[in-house]
Amino acid sequence: MSQTTGVSEPMEPALPRRKGRPRDAGADERILAAAADLILQRGYDNMTVDEVAATAKAGKATVYRRWAGKEDLAFAALEQLYSQEFPVPDTGNITDDLRASYKQVLEFANSEAGLAYLRMSITESLRDERIATLYIGAHQRQERAARAVFERAIERGELRADFRTDLAVSQLGGIVVLRAVVGGMPTEADVEDMIDLILKGIEKR
């Protein structure tokens, strides 16, 4: 046991704390964006963590501190990608709603990024159940939103009460997915004919 001498010993001066490298607040966003972009361009199999890190201007160690491996990183990137949705128009009449909706979907589907998104989604959904769940979830959310367009038209009296909203909603999505595979994607020039087909049908009157 030490004895108290009554004399205070001089305190050692406190050393300044060493500052580590500050955390890059935007690193996560850049990494996820880079991963999503590379998956869209090349598919999951051809995306590497090294390339993601280089594209995002982040160290490889930074990537692995946040995600355990390539699969977790890819899933997180796609989860963020599939969370994005098209705004649902509400112009007050069904024709203008469909015109706005069809134009934005076809503009996206005819873009390089949009076509890559569609083809990647089809391919990767068949390969990985987790990605399929993300894609199906995103598709179902967009379908519910699109169904509201037709339901509002029914309430306004523009469409008959027994109108098959499920088939109407599936029309555009089915065409876009099919054409992403076989080619010949409709363009904005086809919008008016597509609206006429869905609202008026093909029966001679």
Image (cartoon, rainbow, N blue to C red):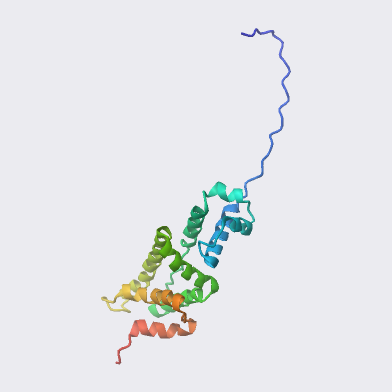
Residue drawn at point x = 46 percent, y = 74 percent: 105
Viewer-proximal residue among 143 and 162: 143
Viewer-proximal residue among 57 and 8: 57
Residue drawn at point x = 31 percent, y = 78 percent: 159
User: Residue 68's spot in the image, x, y percent?
Assistant: 51, 48
**Quadrant of the image occupied by residue 3:** top right
Q: Is residue 203 left or right of residue 174?
A: left
Residue 193 to residue 53: above or below: below
Work out which residue is located at the far front of the displayed protein and give it.
45
Residue drawn at point x = 61 percent, y = 57 percent: 56
Viewer-proximal residue among 182 and 152: 182
User: Residue 158's spot in the image, x, y percent?
Assistant: 33, 79
User: Residue 60's spot in the image, x, y percent?
Assistant: 61, 51
Residue 92 shows in the view: no
User: Residue 142's spot in the image, x, y percent?
Assistant: 40, 67
Residue 120 to residue 51: above or below: below
**Where's the N terminus, which quadrant?**
top right
**Where's the C terminus, which quadrant?**
bottom left
Residue 109 shows in the view: yes
Question: Total label count?
Answer: 0
Work out which residue is located at the far bottom of the displayed protein and give it.
205
Q: Is residue 59 left or right of residue 135?
A: right
